[in-house]
């Protein structure tokens, strides 16, 4: 365990590492953008699409993208994949507001978008902040139109207007959970009228969209447009010891495992780094961890390194593999001490955090890693001077949550949750300690090299 870990680390190294991390965050606010950013980084490190290979040998570096929203990469080690792989899995989707399929309407001579929130949010945190609109519109003919408004300094932004305190007497007497309903999250997008008689403001917006993007109202039906906070990732504190940003859950573990994978030089085992979508809504769907994509990719690795691939090769490989489920955990917050039990809490600045289990109530919905595997990871970290800690996700019966660990463990792979503690998790501005960012990187690198 390492309280006050800051006292014996190289601060310059840590701060430099986090400069790059902040740039990564600013270029990766959606799962699609994050996939593109990761692709760019790994291609410049000689990773190639697995589709270019007829066979694979030690040292080969490959990746595969799943529907533009998830990406997986692998490096064939001295040992072939069927002898077991060292895997790290994180997720690159974050809580946000999605546009509804029919989003656009006019009310009181304003144009607005209706939204449907994605993942666990406290709705009030999304009021009265600048929002960017990022995503794709797919035309009927398959043409893809990329949209990003609000990220450039000169761009306009969008916002959901909150009620002034002067007239909020009724509102303020409500419970916080009832303050806003899902249907209250309507985004202000314009007020200029066209020459139409009816719904002139809505009509004007449609004309602008047609002129700028060539899209019509029906095109929203086949779009994925996400509203995310417009503000950039920043250093936090007089001493800049924290990073504050939207989407650190879980791009903090995605970035640190990505760079660890690239930097890991002495890899005996075949190493795999997976960046999944849809974790925040239960890892469902064909881009989430529960989909066959993960298994299929690992099967391809074996198939391309071995004659006469059979299903049992993959199953045996699972049994010999090990995985870190790289996801964030709650950091002990002096403002909210009573939701955590101090002995079993993660501290921002205490190092990368293992969680033997997550879940809720009586360890419901968690994989609960084997003690033998926890010991193995602990040994790897200790031998490599990684500052680490272990924690539960809050007090027993206080609430809870889950990660992708359970789905990977279900494949018969030894899996342990291991990630970075976060303050204000799932808020538009999550906070992490730079020390923990760096220790996650060191820990993941040691794991890949184990
Ligand atoms: Mn997460
Ligand atoms: Mn989350």
Image (cartoon, rainbow, N blue to C red):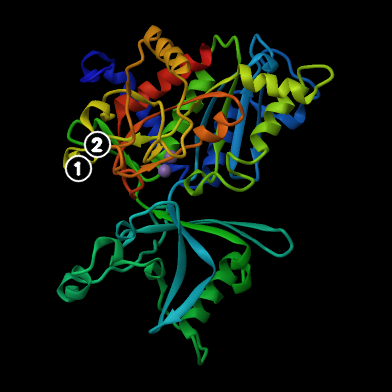
Judge left or right: residue 257 versus residue 291: left
Helix, strand or loop for disc 2: loop
| Residue at numbered disc 2 | 340
Q: Measuring 53% from the left and 72% from the top, which residue is drawn there? A: 208
Q: Can residue 11 be seen in the rendering of this structure?
A: yes
In the image, 10 versus 415, the foreground residue is 415
Q: On the picture, is 334 further left or further right than 135?
A: left
230 lies left or right of 303 = left
Crowdedness of circle 1 by 10 Å Cα count: few (<14), some, many (20+)?
Answer: few
Q: Residues within 10 Å of mark 2 (few under 14, many from 20)?
A: many
The residue beneath circle 1 is 336
Q: Position of residue 218 (x, y in %)?
A: 63, 72
SS class of the residue under badge 1? helix
- Residue 93 lies, with reference to residue 313, above or below; the image says below
Q: How many labels sit on residues?
A: 2
How far apart marks 1 and 2 lie (CA) works out to: 8 Å
Name the quadrant where ligand 1 sits: top left
**Residue ID at (58%, 43%):** 288
């Amino acid at each position: 365990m390492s309280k006050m870990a800051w006292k014996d680390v190289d601060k310059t190294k840590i701060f430099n590492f986090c400069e790059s991390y902040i740039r990564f965050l600013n270029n990766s606010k959606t799962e699609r953008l994050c996939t593109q950013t990761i692709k760019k980084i790994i291609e410049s490190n000689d990773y190639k699409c697995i589709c270019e290979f007829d066979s694979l040998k030690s040292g080969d570096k490959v990746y595969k993208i799943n529907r533009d929203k998830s990406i997986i990469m692998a490096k064939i080690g001295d040992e072939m994949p069927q002898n077991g792989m060292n895997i790290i899995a994180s997720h690159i989707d974050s809580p946000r507001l999605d546009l509804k399929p029919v989003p656009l309407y006019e009310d009181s001579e304003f144009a607005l978008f209706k939204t449907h929130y994605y993942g666990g949010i406290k709705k009030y945190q999304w009021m009265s902040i600048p929002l960017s609109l990022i995503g794709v519109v797919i035309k009927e003919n398959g043409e893809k139109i990329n949209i990003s408004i609000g990220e450039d300094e000169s761009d306009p932004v969008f916002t959901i207007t909150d009620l002034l305190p002067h007239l909020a007497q009724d509102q303020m007497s409500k419970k916080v959970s009832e303050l806003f309903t899902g249907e209250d999250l309507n985004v202000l997008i314009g007020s200029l009228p066209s020459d139409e008689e009816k719904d002139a403001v809505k009509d004007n917006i449609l004309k602008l969209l047609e002129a700028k993007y060539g899209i019509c109202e029906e095109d929203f039906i086949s779009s994925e447009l996400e509203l995310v906070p417009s503000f950039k990732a920043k250093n936090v504190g007089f001493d800049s010891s924290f990073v504050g940003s939207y989407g650190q859950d879980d791009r903090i573990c995605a970035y640190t495992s990505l760079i660890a994978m690239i930097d890991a030089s002495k890899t005996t085992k075949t190493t795999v780094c997976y960046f999944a979508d849809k974790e925040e809504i239960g890892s469902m769907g064909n881009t989430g961890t529960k989909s066959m994509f993960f298994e299929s990719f690992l099967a391809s690795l074996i198939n391309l390194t071995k004659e006469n691939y059979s299903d049992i090769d993959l199953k045996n490989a699972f049994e010999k593999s090990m995985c870190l489920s790289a996801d964030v955990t709650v950091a002990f917050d002096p403002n909210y001490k009573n939701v955590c039990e101090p002995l079993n809490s993660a501290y921002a600045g205490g190092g990368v955090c293992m969680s033997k289990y997550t879940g809720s109530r009586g360890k419901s919905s968690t994989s609960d890693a084997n003690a033998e595997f926890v010991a193995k990871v602990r040994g790897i970290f200790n031998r490599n001077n990684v500052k680490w800690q272990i924690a539960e996700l809050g007090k027993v019966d206080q609430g809870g949550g889950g990660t992708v660990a359970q789905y990977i463990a279900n494949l018969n792979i030894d899996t342990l949750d291991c990630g970075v503690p976060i303050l204000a998790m799932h808020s538009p501005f999550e906070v992490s300690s730079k020390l923990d960012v760096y220790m996650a990187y060191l820990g993941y690198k040691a794991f890949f090299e184990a």
